[in-house]
Image (tube, rainbow, N blue to C red):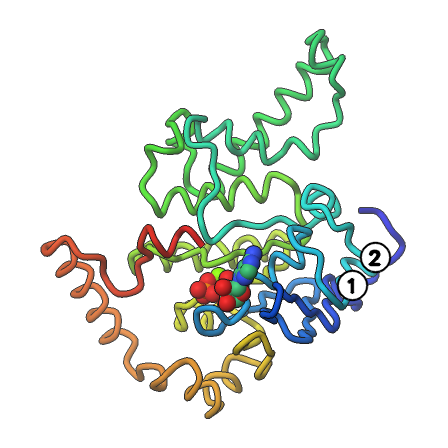
């Protein structure tokens, strides 16, 4: 969006102020204030049911907050998901939302449609303008598949991708709308440690492209490695916000969420995770940290 404010690199990209979301008698988000600045990776953590996804939904036009306001580049966001996407905010979903019977490439092309300028008549006539736009869209989608490491799967149906690659494809599709801010809701849920590390690298690479990131995740190592700033939601309220160091040493956070301090020896913790995953494969039960179908419905 080309507004005078968009050239001000010191102003927050996203500013959510006093956001409250009530569902009947339940207040899922309580007066939450959050900013994301250009170039930042900000984490949003909190126990199950803390209101993280609901807060994302308030930022992306899926829900209209009961109270409060959300601005992007200084402008109030319209309460419609497609208008929020056009304004420059893209997201992925906790429960993957791909078109299962479309190819990987087609899924990314769908994500880019908000940026295609050619109109309906041009598309129907399939004139030179349309063909040029179509080629540009395909080239861009392929570039995003290269970027996310999925180019070799471009012609596969998305439903045939392993779970971790479906999550990556959601990211590629979100990037196709040329966002200035990307919201990721549990991007590593169900991933093994190697996939999680690759996703960490991907998020850094996204930031290097000039896209700010707001990420929800339960994997604390992922969050504390990745984020410049972390906010903690507990029962809909922001408990604390700060650098990873500040947040992970806060006693209330440890008590409310983390349980025990992070492992001193990440190698050891990782070995335990790999062992748990291998044991799960042997017994056929999901490993700790994977998401069950039931959880995925949320
Ligand atoms: N559409 C809705 N109608 C009624 N209640 C809802 C709705 N969406 C969410 N809630 C409730 O709001 C609370 C916050 O849910 P939310 O999904 O935002 O939590 P979360 O922090 O994303 O949890 P998780 O880590 O499990 O994904 C929960 O009590 C949930 O049941
Ligand atoms: Mg959630």
Res. 75 mark: 2
Q: Indicate if the residue with disc 2 has its beta carbon within 8 Å of ligand 1.
A: no
Q: Which residue is mark 1?
A: 9
Q: Is residue 88 above or below residue 226?
A: above
Task: From the top left corner, tell me how far across and down residue 99 is, in percent.
Answer: 47, 32
Residue at the location (60% across, 79% down)?
238
Q: Is residue 288 above or below residue 138?
A: below
**Residue lying at the far left of the rendered structure:** 282
| Mark 1 neighbour density, 10 Å: few (under 14) some (14–19) many (20 or more) | few
Residue in front for this viewpoint, 93 or 268:
93
Task: From the top left corner, tell me how far across and down residue 221 is, in percent.
Answer: 39, 72
Q: Is residue 188 above or below residue 2?
A: below
> Taking the image as drawn, is residue 216 in sight?
no
| Nearer mark to the viewer, of 2 and 1 | 2
**How far apart are the alpha carbons under marks 2 and 1?**
15 Å
**Residue lying at the far right of the rendered structure:** 4
**Which image quarter is the C terminus in?**
bottom left
> Taking the image as drawn, is residue 187 in sight?
yes
Q: Is residue 85 left or right of residue 235?
A: right
- Label 1, secondary structure: give it: loop
Res. 163 mark: none
Residue at the location (70% across, 69% down)?
19
Residue in front for this viewpoint, 72 or 296:
296
């Amino acid at each position: 969006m080309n507004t005078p404010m968009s050239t001000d690199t010191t102003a927050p990209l996203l500013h959510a102020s006093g956001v409250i979301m009530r569902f009947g008698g339940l207040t899922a988000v309580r007066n939450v204030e959050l900013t994301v600045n250009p170039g930042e990776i900000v984490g949003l953590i909190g126990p199950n049911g803390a209101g993280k996804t609901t807060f994302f939904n308030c930022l992306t036009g899926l829900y209209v907050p009961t109270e409060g306001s959300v601005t992007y580049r200084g402008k109030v966001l319209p309460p419609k998901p497609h208008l929020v996407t056009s304004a420059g905010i893209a997201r992925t979903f906790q429960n993957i939302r791909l078109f299962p019977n479309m190819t990987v490439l087609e899924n990314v092309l769908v994500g880019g449609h908000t940026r295609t300028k050619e109109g309906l008549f041009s598309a129907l006539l399939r004139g030179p303008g349309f063909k040029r736009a179509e080629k540009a869209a395909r080239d861009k989608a392929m570039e995003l598949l290269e970027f996310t490491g999925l180019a070799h799967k471009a012609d596969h149906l998305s439903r045939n991708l392993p779970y971790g690659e479906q999550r990556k494809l959601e990211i590629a599709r979100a990037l196709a709308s040329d966002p200035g801010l990307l919201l990721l809701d549990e991007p590593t849920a169900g991933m093994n440690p190697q996939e999680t590390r690759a996703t960490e690298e991907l998020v850094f690479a996204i930031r290097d492209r000039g896209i700010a990131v707001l990420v929800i995740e339960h994997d604390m190592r992922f969050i504390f490695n990745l984020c410049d700033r972390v906010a903690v939601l507990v029962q809909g309220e922001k408990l604390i916000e700060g650098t990873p160091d500040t947040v992970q040493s806060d006693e209330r956070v440890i008590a409310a969420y983390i349980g025990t301090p992070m492992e001193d020896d990440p190698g050891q913790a990782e070995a335990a995770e790999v062992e748990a995953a291998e044991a799960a494969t042997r017994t056929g039960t999901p490993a700790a940290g994977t998401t069950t179908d039931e959880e995925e419905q949320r």
